[in-house]
Amino acid sequence: MSKSKIITKRIILPDYPHHIVQRGHNRQVIFAENEDFKNYLENLHELKAKYKIKVFAYCLMTNHIHLLLQPGKRTENIGKFMKVLSARATRYFNVLEGRSGTLWESKYKSSVVQSEEYLLACLRYIELNPVRAGIKEHPEEYLWSSYIPRMGGDRKEWLDIDPMFLSLGETETIRRENYLKFIGENVPSGESEFIRTALKRGQLTGNSRFIDAIEHIVGRRIERRGQGRPFKNKDNFK
């Protein structure tokens, strides 16, 4: 594999989590009423089953969405899933507003996530979106993210639980208690920017060892940058 050329083409891998963001065209409002959010989540539920996509986390903001998805063996399904999900949202919006045209800003952005060190950090990043935006003081106050069902309220049986969240404790109660502590901690310096930059540039959310492993899998060099601070592992919750 040549080390002289670095390629940043979108990377989709089977059985790996992918952090995805999609924004409204010109940052226009996508979700204005409760029914708008509900419609998107209904489609998310239906299509995840059809395309065999796991949904580990989501957050629907007024003008963009965050998803943490994991495809099965057929990596092309994640693209099909996003295409249909986006198209349904566009049709819904256009009928509602009596308009035509695009709803979304170009293609969605995605980043493959290193599970062991960054998956929980990505969960926190996604579910703290309303707090960073100054909309709410705590994620439990925001109805349109995966935080409330993850913590046992308004339970959505279709929300998949990732293995790193499961590693937080032997029982559901312990896992939720530890995740609540994790959410309440000060986010390590640079962590949010690292996740945001990886997503914006379509790079990997992981350390250099992870990048080496993915380069070996895809057979090409991937653009590198300074790695972020990894999330503490489950041993810190014992």
Image: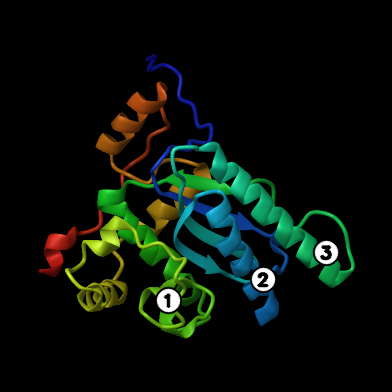
Quarter of the rendering containing residue 92:
bottom right
Crowding around mark 2 (Cα neighbors within 10 Å: few <14, some 14 to 19, many 20+) is some
Q: Give whichever of 87, 7 is nearer the camera.
A: 87
Crowding around mark 3 (Cα neighbors within 10 Å: few <14, some 14 to 19, many 20+) is some
- 81 left or right of 173? right
Which of the marked residues, 3 or 1, is nearer the chain's N terminus? 3
CB contact under 8 Å: marks 2 and 1:
no
SS at badge 2: helix
Quarter the C terminus occupies: bottom left
Crowding around mark 1 (Cα neighbors within 10 Å: few <14, some 14 to 19, many 20+) is some
Identified at 50% across, 42% down, the residue is 202
Q: Which residue matches tag 1?
A: 149
Q: Is 159 rendered above or below residue 54? A: below
Q: Is 228 rendered above or below residue 129? A: above
Q: CA distance from mark 3 to mark 1?
A: 30 Å
Q: Which residue matches tag 3?
A: 94
Q: Give whichever of 167, 27 is nearer the camera.
A: 167
Q: Mark 2: which amino acid?
A: Asn
Q: Which residue matches tag 2?
A: 39
- Residue 214, image x and y in percent? 35, 32
Quarter the N terminus occupies: top left
- Residue 26, image x and y in percent? 73, 58
Q: Residue furthest front?
A: 50
